[in-house]
């Protein structure tokens, strides 16, 4: 089985807690770097707050376990102005050459 053509350049971002100046914390997104990926839709969007969310399957080259640039479920991809929240990550093949990330598009409210 051949790996899909990885022609989309996505920015991987991770959440970071930052002080809000009032004794609490807010959330900011930190860029971890760009990845080349194949992006496919995975079914029709569901209705959420009257806006359809696009569900995606993102395949990228594997990143070593424990590396900062390895995607996890709390991270997201940025594609220009569009944001895709990662819901799950698993190895794409038995040899561990690719990672598959299941993501949903974040919709502004």
Image: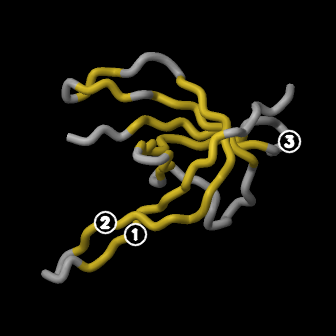
Pick out the residue farthest to the top: 44
Quarter location, residue 60: top right
Q: Residue 98 in the image: x percent, y percent? A: 75, 42
- SS at mark 1? strand
Q: In terms of depth relative to the viewer, which is nearer, 108 or 63?
A: 108
Q: In terms of depth relative to the viewer, which is nearer, 109 or 21?
A: 109
Q: Say which label, 2 or 3, has the lower sequence index.
A: 2
Residue 9 versus residue 38 in the image, above or below: below
The C terminus - image quarter: top left
- Residue drawn 40% across and 64% down? 29
Tell me the distance, in whole angstroms, between the alpha carbons under discs 2 and 3: 36 Å
- SS at mark 2? strand
Mark 3, Cα crowd under 10 Å, few <14 / some 14-19 / many 20+, is: few
Q: Name the residue under label 1.
A: 16
Mark 2, Cα crowd under 10 Å, few <14 / some 14-19 / many 20+, is: few
Tell me the distance, in whole angstroms, between the alpha carbons under discs 1 and 3: 32 Å
- Does the residue at mark 1 contact the one at mark 2 (Cβ under 8 Å)? yes
Tell me the distance, in whole angstroms, between the alpha carbons under discs 1 and 2: 6 Å
- SS at mark 3? loop
Q: Residue 62 in the image: x percent, y percent? A: 74, 50
- Residue drawn 85% across and 29% down? 2
Q: Mark 2 points at which residue?
A: 27
Q: Residue 34 in the image: x percent, y percent? A: 62, 57
Residue 11 versus residue 90 in the image, above or below: below
Mark seen at residue 95: 3
Mark seen at residue 80: none
């Amino acid at each position: 089985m051949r790996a899909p053509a990885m022609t989309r350049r996505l920015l991987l971002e991770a959440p970071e807690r930052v002080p809000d100046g009032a004794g609490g914390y807010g959330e900011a997104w930190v860029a971890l770097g760009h990845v080349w990926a194949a992006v496919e839709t995975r079914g029709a969007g569901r209705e959420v707050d009257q806006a359809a969310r696009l569900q995606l399957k993102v395949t990228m080259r594997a990143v070593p376990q424990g590396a900062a640039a390895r995607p996890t479920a709390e991270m997201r991809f940025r594609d220009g102005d569009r944001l895709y929240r990662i819901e799950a990550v698993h190895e794409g093949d038995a040899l561990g050459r690719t990672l598959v990330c299941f993501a949903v598009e974040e919709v502004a409210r």
